[in-house]
């Protein structure tokens, strides 16, 4: 497909600097741009490439200031990154869509599915499972008894959804994600651990996306809940009875222990660990590899470290930590001089 700068600008409601008839048929990174491609700049450290790129069209923020003449046509928008995402969504929506039921799939007589669905080979739909309209279920997906999957949701290969769980509309679950496996519940006895049956479920609301190999445990009683707009990266553990608020982002290899409640619009960075039964306020940011052992009740708080502390305090502590070898040497030197003074005074 080929698009002119004018067509792109009209779609994005942007303004053009350069040739409105300039055409592109592919995309590229700004530093690797070639003729006929579209690139974008969102991070200021890449601005230098606008003077050397071979891309024909470049999306930039409205406030970008140029120091010298450039060759590509510019389209100025409010947010170049979001504009680029909108273009990619437009492009993918034009691609051929899979539809139809593979004869090698298994669908229970009591299961149902809506219009324009795709159900791939070796997929299993259990008793009383319900699948909405325009759902894409790729090969080797397991949808258990009484599971509900909403309209326009995509389940990529190997996704497993255990019985009684609910997945909302417009969700994307990437390969090998497991929804509704048992929570880690055991009652310790005399040298043994008695399993506590996990009789709850998982509720995933609309517009949620998970990466690959994510585990979301069912609740012991009640529901583990991912609220609308939650985004999970790859390799994440969500334990039983956890609740994650709307539009919260959790990055790769993070883990959230049982019954913790996460607020709205939070950001939890890679490899962070949050212990159980805590409350995390709205808009909180938790840095990479942080260990959160206490509730964070202040809206918008930023924490870092293990155990996690206020970001500013942790930064100051890190600066001191780096200087410890030097401080240790100075302390030894001072101790040595003090001993010499004592010997001279005796």
Image: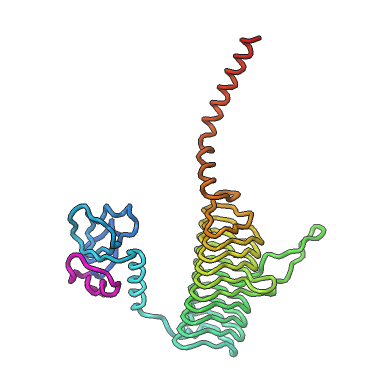
Taking the image as shown, residue 271 lies to the left or right of residue 43, namely right
Q: Nearer the viewer, residue 249 or 31?
A: 249
The magenta stretch spans residue 12: yes
Q: Residue furthest right?
A: 190
Residue 2 showing in the rendered view: no
State the residue at coordinates (53%, 84%).
131
Relative height, residue 324 to residue 76 (above, below): above
State the residue at coordinates (46%, 80%).
152
Relative height, residue 290 to residue 324 (above, below): below
Q: Nearer the viewer, residue 212 or 311?
A: 311
Write down the region rendered in magenta. Answer: 1-23
x and y, in percent, of residue 82 in the image:
36, 67
State the residue at coordinates (61%, 65%).
261
Q: Quadrant of the N terminus?
A: bottom left
User: Residue 236 is drawn in which quadrant?
Assistant: bottom right
x and y, in percent, of residue 310 in the image:
55, 50
State the residue at coordinates (57%, 70%).
178
Q: Nearer the viewer, residue 62 or 208?
A: 62
x and y, in percent, of residue 246 in the image:
52, 69
x and y, in percent, of residue 315 in the image:
51, 45
Taking the image as shown, residue 312 lies to the left or right of residue 64, namely right
User: Residue 36 is drawn in which quadrant?
Assistant: bottom left
Q: Quadrant of the C terminus?
A: top right
Task: State the count of labels.
Answer: 0
Taking the image as shown, residue 139 lies to the left or right of residue 53, namely right
Relative height, residue 322 to residue 75 (above, below): above
């Amino acid at each position: 497909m080929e698009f002119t700068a004018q067509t792109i600008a009209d779609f994005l409601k942007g303004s053009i600097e350069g040739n409105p008839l300039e055409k592109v048929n592919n995309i590229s990174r700004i530093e690797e741009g070639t003729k006929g491609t579209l690139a974008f700049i969102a991070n200021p450290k890449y601005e230098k490439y606008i003077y050397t790129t071979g891309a024909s069209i470049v999306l930039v923020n409205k406030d970008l200031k140029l120091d010298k003449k450039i060759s590509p046509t510019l389209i100025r928008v409010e947010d170049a990154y979001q504009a680029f995402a909108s273009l990619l969504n437009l492009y993918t929506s034009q691609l051929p869509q899979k539809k139809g039921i593979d004869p090698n799939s298994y669908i229970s007589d009591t299961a149902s599915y809506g219009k324009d669905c795709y159900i791939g080979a070796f997929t299993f739909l259990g008793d009383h499972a319900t699948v909405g309209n325009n759902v894409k279920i790729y090969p080797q997906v397991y949808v258990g008894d009484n599971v509900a999957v909403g309209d326009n949701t995509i389940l990529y290969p190997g996704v497993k959804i255990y019985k009684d769980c609910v997945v909302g509309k417009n969700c994307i679950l990437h390969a090998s994600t497991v929804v509704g496996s048992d929570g880690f519940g055991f009652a310790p006895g005399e040298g043994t651990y008695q399993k506590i049956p996990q009789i709850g479920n998982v509720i995933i609301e609309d517009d949620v996306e998970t990466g690959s190999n994510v585990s979301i445990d069912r609740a012991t009683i009640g529901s583990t809940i991912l609220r609308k707009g939650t985004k999970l990266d790859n390799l994440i553990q969500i334990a039983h009875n956890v609740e994650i608020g709307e539009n919260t982002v959790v990055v790769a290899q993070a883990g959230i222990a049982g019954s913790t409640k996460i607020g709205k619009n939070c950001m939890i960075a890679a490899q962070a660990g949050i212990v159980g039964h805590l409350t995390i306020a709205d808009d909180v940011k938790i840095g990479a590899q942080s260990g959160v052992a206490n509730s964070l009740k202040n809206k918008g708080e930023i924490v870092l470290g293990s155990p996690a502390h206020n970001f500013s305090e942790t930064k100051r502590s890190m600066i001191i930590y780096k200087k410890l070898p030097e401080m240790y040497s100075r302390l030894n030197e001072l101790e040595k001089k003090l001993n010499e003074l004592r010997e001279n005074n005796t």
